[in-house]
Structures are given as structure tokens and as C-alpha cells.
């Protein structure tokens, strides 16, 4: 074999070796990239799981804090009702009479109200009230509508209610709107719609179970 032929064989073998090294390098790089992507996905998944656990823990803590807040509010409400002596049963007729007297004494133009049946305060979705020891917090919702000459008329009405009835008056919402005024006569320029609760505290009556009869 001549020298040029030998050089051609050597160059071809060298080329094959270089191509093999290049292929192995590409294969190794692809393997490294695939492994890196796999580890990245695992790290991202672990990060998302950690965030989810953190959010779940935070939600549980928020629920615990909310429960504590409600318990403290119940205790404060109980102490306030006991301090004011407002632990008697619902006195709906007296409330109606009080509303009539306030309307007359404050010379309100009109006073419309609707008192709904009494229910447990802050009842759950199943209609049951949360446990409060040996007492029940009861609420009588009332919708109140009245025309106003001034906003002070509404403030005075609510203050009188709170002072004169044997119940805790809780104002959940009040909305005041402007009414068209008649310049020829004294008419209301405002109208108010309020949602109120009359809250009372009653000792829970527990029925005694009959004693089983002793066999004769």
C-alpha cells in the first residue's frame, strides 16, 4: 500500500473516532440536560407542595384565630347582657310599645317595622346555635323603615331603643337615601332602612329524664 493510501486510511479512522467522540459528547450532554430538567421538575413540584402545605397551615391558623375571636365576642356579649340585666325572655309587646313611644316623643313622621320570629343568634347552616354553656343567645331580627328630616332622628331613635328595652340592640346595617323634597311643606328629605337584632340571653332549660322504674 502506498503512502497516500495509508494516510487516507489513517484519516478515515481518525474521522470515525472523532465522530464517535462527538456522538458520545452529544449523548452525554443530552443525558445531563434530561437529568437537569427532571431534577428541576422535582424541585418545582416539591416547592409547590411546600407552598400548598404552608397555605393549608396558614388557613388552619386563621380558622383558629377566628374561632378565638368569636369565643371572646361571645364572652363579652354574655358579660354585657348580664351586666345590664338583659337576661329575660323576649318581650315583643313591650318592644312594640317602646317603638310607639319613641315615635311620639321624637315626633317622627312615620315608623314602619317588621319583627321576624326569634332564632338562635349566629345560627349555623343546620339551624343549630353554637354551644354557649348553659345559656342561649337569641336574636329577634327587625327591619326598620322611616322617613327622616335629619340624620339625627335616626341616631336618636337607635339610642332610645338601646336605653329603654330589656334587650341588646345590635344594628347590622343602616342605609340612608335622599328623597325628593316638597318646598311647599315640611316633608322628609331622607329615608332610612335598617336591619337590627334584638338580642337576649336565656338560661337553657334541660328536660330531666324520667327515672327508670324499679322492677316490682
Image: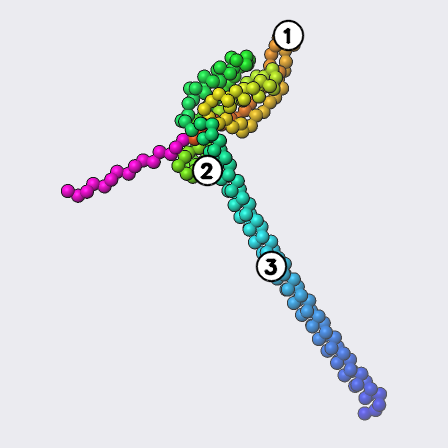
Q: Which residues are magenta?
A: 202-216
Q: Is residue 30 left or right of residue 82?
A: right
> In this rendering, is residue 190 above or below 9?
above
Disc 1 packing (10 Å; few <14; some 14–19; many ≥20): few
Local secondary structure at mark 3:
helix
Q: CA distance from mark 2 to mark 1?
A: 51 Å
Return the x and y of residue 196 as percentages of the image width and height. 51, 26
Residue under label 3: 46
- Circle count: 3
Most extreme residue toward the left is: 216
Residue under label 2: 124
Local secondary structure at mark 1:
loop
Q: Earlier in the sequence, mark 1 or mark 3?
A: 3
Do the residues bearing badges 2 and 1 touch, measured as CB atoms within 8 Å?
no
- The N terminus: image quadrant: bottom right
Residue under label 1: 184
Return the x and y of residue 148 as percentages of the image width and height. 59, 17
**Can residue 188 be seen from the camera position used here?**
yes
Comparing 7 with 199, the one in front is 199
Q: Residue at x 60, y 59 (%)?
A: 46
Q: Earlier in the sequence, mark 2 or mark 1?
A: 2
Amino acid at each position: 500500500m502506498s503512502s497516500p493510501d495509508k494516510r487516507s486510511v489513517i484519516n478515515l479512522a481518525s474521522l470515525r473516532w472523532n465522530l464517535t467522540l462527538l456522538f458520545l459528547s452529544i449523548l452525554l450532554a443530552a443525558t445531563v440536560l434530561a437529568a437537569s430538567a427532571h431534577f428541576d421538575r422535582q424541585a418545582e413540584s416539591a416547592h409547590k407542595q411546600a407552598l400548598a402545605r404552608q397555605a393549608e397551615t396558614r388557613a388552619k391558623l386563621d380558622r383558629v384565630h377566628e374561632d378565638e375571636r368569636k369565643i371572646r365576642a361571645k364572652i363579652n356579649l354574655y358579660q354585657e347582657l348580664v351586666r345590664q340585666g338583659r337576661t329575660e325572655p323576649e318581650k315583643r309587646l313591650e318592644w312594640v310599645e317602646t317603638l310607639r313611644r319613641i315615635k311620639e316623643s321624637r315626633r317622627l313622621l312615620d315608623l314602619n317595622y317588621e319583627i321576624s320570629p326569634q332564632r338562635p343568634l349566629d345560627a349555623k347552616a343546620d339551624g343549630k346555635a353554637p354551644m354557649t354553656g348553659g345559656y342561649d343567645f337569641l336574636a329577634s331580627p327587625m327591619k326598620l323603615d322611616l322617613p327622616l328630616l335629619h340624620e339625627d332622628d335616626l341616631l336618636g331613635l337607635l339610642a332610645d331603643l338601646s336605653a329603654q328595652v330589656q334587650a341588646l340592640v345590635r344594628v347590622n346595617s343602616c342605609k340612608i337615601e335622599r328623597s325628593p323634597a316638597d318646598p311647599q311643606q315640611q316633608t322628609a328629605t331622607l329615608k332610612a332602612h335598617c336591619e337590627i337584632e334584638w338580642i337576649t340571653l336565656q338560661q337553657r332549660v334541660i328536660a330531666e329524664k324520667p327515672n327508670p322504674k324499679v322492677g316490682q
